[in-house]
Amino acid sequence: MTIETNMTNEQTMTTKTPERTMVKRTKTVVPDEVPAGWQPPTWEEIVTEHSARVYRLAYRLTGNVHDAEDLTHDVFVRVFRSLGSYRPGTFEGWLHRITTNVFLDKMRRKQRIRFDALSDDAAARLVSRSGSPEQIYADAHFDDDIQHALDALSPDFRAAVVLCDIEGLSYEEVAATLDVKLGTVRSRIHRGRAQLRAALAHRDPSQRPVTEPIDRPITQPIQTGVQTGVRGLGVRRPAGVGG
């Protein structure tokens, strides 16, 4: 997937009104909060440094290559339009918030997610200096069981679980990213994990049928759900994800 590093004149023109609005909204920023001489990152820097990270999160949220590419494109369009309002801070956190907000906006309009076949050459289209196409593809994809289980979650639950258990954000950071209360985040993650455990129960050896009598209960606590990141799913976290 290729992200254009130059926006067209038409795209630039469409941002005039939002930019004027954002200037008005940022007048209340205390001047001391912005270091003297500070300049926001350029479009080229953002695309080069962050496109692979945004795509990985987009894929986790959407569950398929085509929607992930569409979401990544929409995220960078919004980033371009919002650069004037960005202030020094955690740029990755800002991108997390934009990506999840764009995803939830799209899901509220669409109401459901389609599951498309994965494209073997999707990763080769990523703009990234972080690794080979094979490594980027491995970073972005889970096995089918886990991806299907994530896809089955409601968008709100999925966003919370992905941000916390895959991207590695704290509950407080997830709450700030989703702009919801901490208690809401805890509830969504708890319920999302419970649904994942149920969907992945067949991966737990303790739940397999037995063929001979035993003198202890066969029902054991399920350990295959997301308890402490993707490690709780019985698979290893792909290299580079959530780091």
Image (cartoon, rainbow, N blue to C red):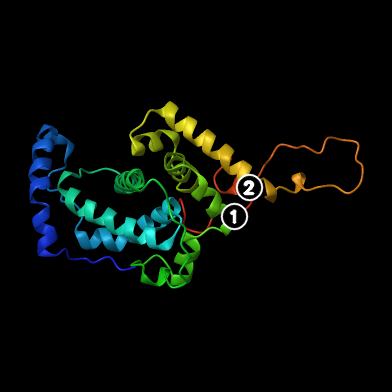
State the residue position of label 2.
200
Left or right placement of residue 174 versus residue 27 in this view: right
Nearer to the camera, 10 or 45: 10
Which quadrant does the N terminus fall into? bottom left
Report which quarter residue 169 is drawn in. top left
Amino acid of disc 2: Leu
Residue 76 position in % (x across, y down): 26, 56
Nearer to the camera, 164 or 70: 70
Amino acid of disc 1: Asp
Residue 97 position in % (x across, y down): 32, 43
For label 2, the SS is loop
Q: Kindly check if marks 1 and 2 are in contact, taking CB atoms under 8 A apart as contact.
A: yes
Left or right placement of residue 223 versus residue 78 in this view: right
Q: Does residue 194 show up? A: yes
Q: Does residue 225 show up? A: no
Q: Which residue is drawn at the image coordinates 81% and 39% (left, top)?
A: 218
Residue 127 position in % (x across, y down): 33, 67
For label 1, the SS is helix
Residue 132 position in % (x across, y down): 44, 71
Q: Is residue 9 above or below residue 176?
A: below
Report which quarter residue 25 is drawn in. top left
Left or right placement of residue 140 versus residue 80 in this view: right
Q: Residues within 10 Å of mark 2 (few under 14, many from 20)?
A: many
Q: Is residue 70 above or below residue 61?
A: below
Of the numbered discs 1 and 2, the one sitting upstream in the chain is 1
Label 1, label 2: how many angstroms apart (C-alpha)? Answer: 7 Å
Nearer to the camera, 29 or 61: 61
Q: How crowded is mark 1: few (under 14 residues within 10 Å), some or many (20 or more)?
A: some
State the residue position of label 1.
145
Nearer to the camera, 56 or 202: 202
Q: Which residue is drawn at the image coordinates 48% and 42% (left, top)?
A: 161
